[in-house]
Image (cartoon, rainbow, N blue to C red):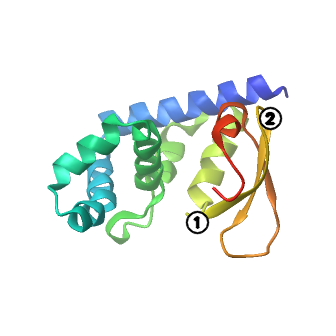
Amino acid sequence: MSGKKTRVEIGAAIRHLTQYAATTEPWGERENEILDELFAPVAEALGRELNDVAADILQGGHGPMALAFAFEESATVQWNNEGETLIDIYLAQRGWREKPTGRRYLQALNAAEIGLWEVVAVTPGQFIDVRRYGGSGKVARIQERSGSESMRVYD
């Protein structure tokens, strides 16, 4: 399968998941809870109101990335020991509508762990090589056109 077709199928799966979350309770509310949890320590450290800090971050250049991170976190966490994530529920109810690549992406996202990674090599416009921060483990290559344009080694 071509890279473009893969990106299209993954993009469609994410769009469908976000649409499902926006129209199904309590998922939209849970995304806001994650955002509050992420920004509260920053607001406290700066001595500012949580809403002001969140607004500054979301309106800045990193706003889309922060929203995407919060959504992915809210979609993959098991809330209140319910035993299922948003992705589990979505795939069980509507996974049939996704193409295989989109389903596999959502399943991989659901199983992924959050971690801090460092950039160890960059080829602008093509890819970045990353590894877990502080480790000497295996390097992973990520095909990323636009992101690799602004990345630098040790970011």
Kindly identify the amino acid type of the residue bearing the numbered disc 2: Gln
Q: Which image quarter holds the N terminus?
A: top right
Quarter occupied by residue 140: bottom right
Label 2 crowd bin: few (<14), some (14–19), many (20+), radius 10 Å: some
| Residue positioned 76% across, 31% down in the render | 125
Q: Left or right: where does residue 91 sit relative to residue 108?
A: left
Residue 83 on image: x %, y %:
43, 67
Kindly identify the amino acid type of the residue bearing the numbered disc 1: Gly
Q: Left or right: where does residue 64 sit relative to residue 55?
A: right
Quarter occupied by residue 119: bottom right
Residue 133, placed above or below residue 89: below
| Residue positioned 27% across, 42% down in the render | 56
Residue 20, numbered circle: none
Residue 23 on image: x %, y %:
31, 33
Q: How far apart, in angstroms, are the residues tagged by discs 2 and 1? A: 23 Å
Residue projecting furthest to the left: 49
Residue 64 on image: x %, y %:
43, 36
Residue beneath label 1, please? 115
Residue 126, numbered circle: 2
Would you say the residues marked 2 and 1 are in contact, meaning their CB atoms lie under 8 Å apart? no
The secondary structure type at the circle numbered 2 is: loop
